[in-house]
Image (spheres, rainbow, N blue to C red):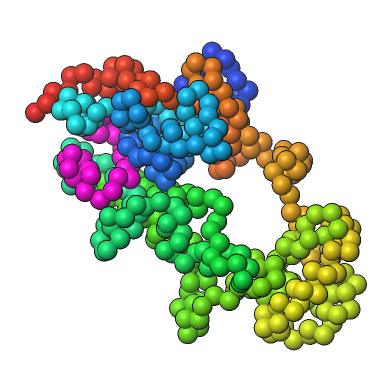
Amino acid sequence: MTARFDPAARAQGDEDGREDQNDQDDLALPLAGLLVVDMSQFLSGPSAALRLADLGADVIKVERPGQGDLCRHLYISNLELDGDSTLFHTINRNKRSYAADLKQPADLDKIRALIARADVLIQNFRPGVMEGIGLDYAKVREINPRIVYGVVTGYGTAGPWVGLPGQDLLVQSRSGLVWLNGDAEQGPVPFGLAVADMLAGAHLVQGLLAALLRRGVTGRGGLVEVSLLESTLDFQFEVLTTHLNDGRQHPSRSTVNNAHAYLGAPYGIYKTQDGYLALAMGSVTRLGTLLGCDALAAFSDPKSWFERRDEIKQVLVDHIATRPTAAWLAILEPADYWCAPVMDWNTLLEHEGFKVLDFVQDVVRDNGASMLTTRCPIRIDGQVLKASRGSPKIGEHNAAIDREFALDRATHG
């Protein structure tokens, strides 16, 4: 594998010498030397490319001139920084941007020349788009037989849903996932996160790394495909397997404090006198003894903890509301009964349990625009992985990439 652009080495030479990079200066990141061409948009593909960048790969984001990745204009709470949405900044930090109009032969030739040097290509266009411009896997493999080609779709590459928009909420809705959330009387409740996108991105990273490992042994590249729907189905593998083997009964959510459609009492979140308390799996009768709730002694049969869970939970609702969260934790935690306070983000961020993780980093664009965001959740050889480079402006690195890979010599042929 030929050594190429190394983000760790680049960061070491940054003039600002930010502290968040110091721990990485002497760290050989696992993917240093890998070149990734990221032709994806929105969340799933770019999140996979981000993780590869966090692990040391040089990620070049190919965007349309002028407009760029549509995620630049996909706002969360209308929050914008330096002309782009904070969502774009978050998902595209530590990458370089190359602007190319793939309808123009000269630009397309440059991208082909870049692909010829790449180790990985990622795209999440609808099926048929890349075939139309001659950059589908069959064509790219002719350019670079060793490339690992990653594809994210909404619903796979066959069947009646292929042409439908692969959007997170729509995928959640088709996958059955939304029938696991909320109380029984609420109807379907979606996750408050783009969970299908994030899961598909994580699965793509797994597949890409596996294919790269195989390439290291055989020299052969490969095609890695994931879909939002399949990733969301896999996310449910535990409960979906139960459904497939229990006569296909509809998931039965609790009407009181539902937290898992397939688990019995006390599993759920309970309002206390001044906040909320989460209770996980555990003996209902032991819980009654610890909390001084005599009514729970009537549920001595463990089967009743599922069959009569709403009744049990209602007893707990009434009892737990009588004292503050800290009072219940002072009883349950020393007894090793599985519980936790329910924290909002402000409480979490101020807690020493969060601070010790060193999970927030400052990323900065070359023009000085900066923002706080999370870091890579993976540690390598005990090292926290941070990278201070912020997301790129559209085409910000065209000139440097042209020189580095001699793209100006590419000719239409």
Is residue 375 something one can see in this rendering? no
Q: Residue at x 46, y 54 (%)?
A: 169
* Rendering coords of residue 36 (x, y %): 35, 35
Which quadrant: the N terminus? top left
Q: Residue at x 27, y 27 (%)?
A: 100
2 vs 306, nearest the viewer:
306
> In which quarter of the view is residue 22 placed?
top right
Vertical position of residue 157 compared to residue 284: above or below: above
Which quadrant: the C terminus? top left
Vertical position of residue 161 compared to residue 356: above or below: below
Q: Residue at x 82, y 85 (%)?
A: 298
Is residue 239 something one can see in this rendering? yes
Q: Residue at x 50, y 22 (%)?
A: 82
341 vs 120, nearest the viewer:
341
22 vs 235, nearest the viewer:
235
- Which residues are the magenta region? 114-135
* Rendering coords of residue 348 (x, y %): 72, 44
Vertical position of residue 271 compared to residue 15: above or below: below
Vertical position of residue 262 compared to residue 396: above or below: below
* Rendering coords of residue 70 (x, y %): 38, 36
Magenta region includes residue 120: yes
* Rendering coords of residue 268 (x, y %): 70, 66
> In which quarter of the view is residue 259 placed?
bottom right
> In which quarter of the view is residue 273 placed?
bottom right
Total count of labels: 0
Magenta region includes residue 32: no
